[in-house]
Image (cartoon, helix red, strand yellow):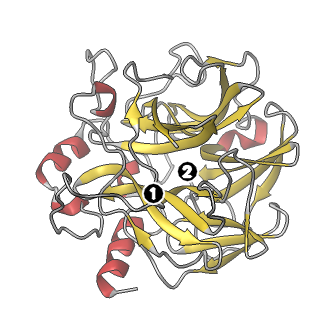
Amino acid sequence: MDANNKNERKTFFGKGFFDWQFSSGEGVHLIEKRYDEKKYWGGFSNTPIDFDSYNPPLWAIGNFKRYENNPVFAPDPKGWDCGRFGGGVHNGSILYIGNKFYYIYRGEFPFKPDKNAPYQDLNYKCDIGIAVSEDGINFERIAGASPFFGKDDDSRYSFEDVNVVRHGGDYYMFLNRWDWNNITDPKISGVYMAHSHDLIHWEKAGLAFPEAKRIHRNPCVLQTPDNFAAKAGGKYIMYINDGLMGISDDLIHWESIELETSWPGGEGCFALTDYRKNDSDSILLFTGGHHTGHFYAIGEVLFSKSNPQKPIDWLPRPVLSASPSRPEESCMSFDNKDVVSDWGDTVFFTGLTKVADKWFLYYGGSEYYTCLATSNM
């Protein structure tokens, strides 16, 4: 890892939590983005690219086309996932099962912190919900099924940023669990696990790394295009933020590894393998973070099953970034009437699944909506 890349990563991740999550709701970060493109370059080369002659590498997935009537999912003003300024429904997982799309998503709601709480700007909490669709566009919440976790003794926590994989006939969920009073304590906050037979009823399995010395967050378990957990080197693989990786024999007991090499592009979002014919070795990691001037955009990094710890290559530009012409990606309501978020120029990878010969990629618009983009295989 070169010095610049290491410093870039340290600046981006800090102690595992991000300064921009402490939002005042005044649009500060949108204004800052307009005047500080260099700050959000993300560690990539700034060599100009002639896109008329540029051909992306064969390992990449590209040509994503936005659904013209985005967003496909929005907060419910009368529900537990009513949203708040700067946060809505996003950062979930998508599964295509029995000709239906199941969306396991993070929903946000306002929360008034205790007057003695150390982080007064963390004025929201999240829980996990489920919605279903027959076409991948029109989603309906499954009545009475959610929220999943934040009840009774667990009401102190915020449950966020879901990654769900299939294994056999069961489902394994990995997410971030936060106690706002202990956000840097890895024995309380960090990667959390749950298990289900039906996607509706979830059995909590606790922290994935209970002995960790620092925060582990944003789990991305390696999976196939059909969202089944996949192994590399005989182990299940979990990419984690801040130079960490998890390995497991059973998807329940995890060991973390400190990586020696890094890559630009910020947070890991989704790890995919077995996605190309005649290629059983490539791993494609979708990333989300500061990317060539965008506050948050979606990038791609190549690894291999033979050495999943070391990046081989990465795209020089994002495969999807916010469009100024799309209000739902530019901190406005989808009808362009109201400001709903701080997070202009922000798209964040949510989930990916394959249906027939088409990729369905879901992403968050301005940390508020869930949107759809598709690409032919």
Q: What residue sits right under mark 1 in the picture?
A: 60
The residue carrying pointer 2 sits among few (fewer than 14), some (14 to 19) or many (20 or more) residues within 10 Å by Cα, namely many
From the viewer's perspective, is 337 left or right of 216? left
Could you tell me residue 50's position as x and y percent?
A: 16, 58
**Three-letter residue code for mark 2:** Trp
Number of numbered discs on residues: 2
**Three-letter residue code for mark 1:** Ala
Please name which of the two marks, 2 or 1, marks the residue nearer to the observer.
Answer: 1
Can you tell which quarter of the image residue 348 is in? Answer: top left
Could you tell me residue 184's position as x and y percent?
A: 55, 65
- Residue furthest toward the front? 278
From the viewer's perspective, is 33 left or right of 130? left
Considering depth in this image, is 348 or 98 the residue closer to the camera? 98
Considering depth in this image, is 321 or 243 the residue closer to the camera? 321
Residue sitting at x 80%, y 61% = 251
The residue carrying pointer 1 sits among few (fewer than 14), some (14 to 19) or many (20 or more) residues within 10 Å by Cα, namely some
Q: Is residue 93 visible?
A: no
Q: Is residue 320 visible?
A: yes
- SS assignment at label 1: loop
Residue sitting at x 61%, y 52% = 176
C-beta proximity under 8 Å, tags 2 and 1: no
Can you tell which quarter of the image residue 371 is in? Answer: top left
Residue sitting at x 61%, y 40% = 353
Q: Earlier in the sequence, mark 2 or mark 1?
A: 1
Q: What residue sits right under mark 2 in the picture?
A: 180
Could you tell me residue 245's position as x and y percent?
A: 62, 72
